[in-house]
Image (tube, rainbow, N blue to C red):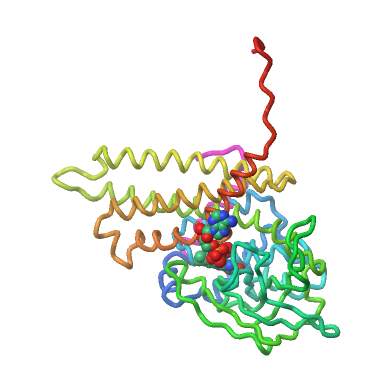
Amino acid sequence: MRSPHFTLEHETFRAEVRAFLAAEVTPHAARWDEEGSVPTRVWKSLGQRGWLGLAHPEEAGGGARDLFTSVVFLEELGRTGFGGLRAAVSVHAYMATHYLARFGGPELMRTHLAPAVRGDRISALAITEPGAGSDLSGLSVTAERVGDLLVVDGVKSMVSNGMTADFLVVAVRTGPAGRGPRGATGLSLLVVDTDLPGVTRVQQRTLGWRSAGTAAITFRAVRVPADRVVGRLDHGFYYLMRGLQLERLVAAVLAVGGAERALDDLCAFLRKRSAAGTALAERQALVHQIADLSTDLAATRQLIYHTAWLYENGELPAVECSMAKLRATELACRVADTSLQFQGSHGYLEESSAARGHRDARAATIAAGPSEVLRDLIGRARLNRPDTPASPAGEA
Ligand SMILES: Cc1cc2nc3c(=O)[nH]c(=O)nc-3n(C[C@H](O)[C@H](O)[C@H](O)COP(=O)(O)OP(=O)(O)OC[C@H]3O[C@@H](n4cnc5c(N)ncnc54)[C@H](O)[C@@H]3O)c2cc1C
């Protein structure tokens, strides 16, 4: 669908990304799902093209491109139909490294962000713990100051890229849990290299996103230089609240890209397959559902583009980011479910793209904020919004 947000330059870039992914990535991605990771050469290849640092500053080797360039890249990544791949790349390029680019100083930019942009070092974001996910005030991994070190203890779980990452951006407790004017207090973000003594990782088998190498990571007296704190000590909650908005927007773009791909695949199936002498594509009961999904996709896309436009223009549109993520990820589940249903037993085979799409779509309504948490946020924002005064009687 055409949109005023995209220039000719964006569309040229889209064609380049699509061609690369179709030739070099999509044909192999099912194997990477089986292997549980995206190979090193793919990271390097993406890095060489500048696609791991599209939004990052030029000082770190990034492209400092506008947000809609990233939207194009993420839509195309979503369109591959491989959730593990899109999670791995987006967590690296838009989540973990985002904190370094936005809040890290020049030294972290040199030591960690620049190699990540080149695809030489892979990153992951470790917030969730076995005992706390949505509720950041419940995080318990500690980082205790000892001289010029921070000593980290505790366990993180559900870390995408966790098995392959060279470094982690970890949410750690550096002060007592509490609430201040800027939200939960006592949290910091800390960059931890995964080859440090005391870091151990165990693969977590997940329903979908299989090539994202999800891991539970244990830290036992891990000694990290104190200058690896991202930004200011105890400001982690504030940074996370900002980063989460981008995370939700990115999740929405990826979901809509994945849903477009699933719908394209379904339409191709319906055109080819016939039952009782009639192509399935002629069955009104099916055609009308395709119409509804297409319409919802078009509307969701516009919500996402509007949110991206607000973000690009300096706002932090928390409600719109939540709405976009809620709407896009739930719609992607609906598309995936319909696709599987309309492909009958073909869709139910484990190796089918419909089955993989179903598994992969499901993850996105949980990661980066479950739908229920988003609904809570959106609903409360609406309820707390002051009423718009009604126009006086008789006035048009
Ligand atoms: C595939 C996948 C990849 C992930 N990757 C990462 C990663 O790379 N790094 C990372 O740190 N984390 C990652 N996560 C974890 C993810 O961010 C958490 O799962 C999410 O924040 C929810 O936390 P939780 O699972 O602990 O669920 P909980 O917080 O325990 O919540 C359980 C359920 O309770 C309900 N609920 C919770 N709070 C509320 C509320 N306030 N209002 C209403 N209902 C509520 C929701 O239905 C929610 O699903 C990933 C998760 C998945 C599924």
Q: Is residue 266 left or right of residue 241?
A: left
Looking at the picture, how far across and down is residue 210, in whole percent?
A: 46, 71
Looking at the picture, how far across and down is residue 175, in whole percent?
A: 78, 72
Q: Quadrant of residue 138?
A: bottom right
Front-lying residue, 90 or 199: 199
Query: Outermost residue, top direction?
Result: 394
Query: Outermost residue, left direction?
Result: 276
Residue 61 shows in the view? no
Front-lying residue, 203 or 381: 381
Looking at the picture, how far across and down is residue 113, in whole percent?
A: 72, 70
Q: Which residues are magenta?
A: 1-24
Q: Is residue 264 left or right of residue 249?
A: left
Does residue 5 belong to the magenta stretch? yes
Residue 248 vertical position relative to residue 107 in the rendered view, above or below: above
Front-lying residue, 270 or 2: 270
Q: Is residue 345 left or right of residue 393?
A: left
Residue at the spot 70% in from the left edge and 73% down from the top edge: 115
Residue at the spot 45% in from the left edge and 75% down from the top edge: 205
Q: Quadrant of residue 208?
A: bottom left
Residue at the spot 72% in from the left edge and 75% down from the top edge: 191
Query: Outermost residue, right direction?
Result: 147
Q: Quadrant of residue 379?
A: top right
Does residue 377 belong to the magenta stretch? no
**Chief secondary structure of the magenta span?**
helix
Looking at the picture, how far across and down is residue 105, in whole percent?
A: 82, 68
Quarter that holds the C terminus: top right
* Image region (quadrant) for ligand 1: bottom right
Residue 203 vertical position relative to residue 346 in the rendered view, above or below: below
Residue at the spot 70% in from the left edge and 47% down from the top edge: 312
- How many numbered discs, if any? 0
Residue 46 vertical position relative to residue 69 in the rendered view, above or below: below
